[in-house]
Amino acid sequence: MRATKKTLTEHSLANLLVPNEHYNYFECRHEHPFRYQFNNFEMINAWWLVEAAFLAYAEPPFAEPRFQDAGLPNVKFFSGNSTQ
């Protein structure tokens, strides 16, 4: 299966900050589902994890619907005194 090339957004500080309201999180998720059966590096899985990591820094009201739209309904956020 060949991955679809994603158009990059404009290079700006605003596009690197969370939440990026103009970014389409988990775009093409239906064409490239997470591959649970793999236990080695898989580019599609790396893409899913990058998307999730970016959203992990957003506030839950922004992030939760995007996770749910991607088919990840059970999202739990936590906070602590150190790295989250």
Image (cartoon, grey):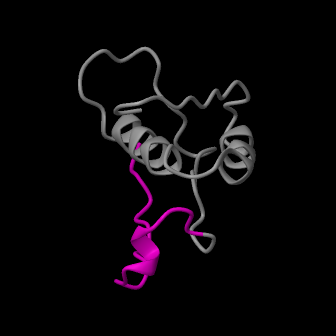
Q: Give how far across and how far down residue 19 sits, in percent.
A: 56, 63
Q: How many marks?
A: 0
Residue 2 in the image: above or below residue 21: above
Residue furthest to the left in view is: 41
Q: Give how far across and how far down residue 68 sits, in percent.
A: 73, 38
Residue 73 in the image: above or below residue 24: above
Q: Residue at x 63, y 70 (%)?
A: 21
Residue 13 in the image: above or below residue 25: below
Q: Residue at x 35, y 18 (%)?
A: 38
Residue furthest to the front in view is: 81
Q: Which residues are magenta?
A: 1-20
In which quadrant will I find the C terminus? top left
Secondary structure mostly seen in magenta is loop
Residue 69 magenta-drawn?
no
Q: Residue at x 68, y 44 (%)?
A: 60
In which quadrant will I find the N terminus? top left
Q: Residue at x 34, y 83 (%)?
A: 11
| Residue 69: quarter of image | top right
Q: Is residue 10 left or right of residue 31?
A: left
Q: Is residue 70 left or right of residue 11?
A: right
Q: Give how far across and how far down residue 18 sits, in percent.
A: 51, 62
Residue 3 magenta-drawn?
yes
Q: Is residue 26 left or right of residue 83?
A: right
Q: Give how far across and how far down residue 10 sits, in percent.
A: 41, 85
Q: Nearest the camera: 42 or 22?
A: 22
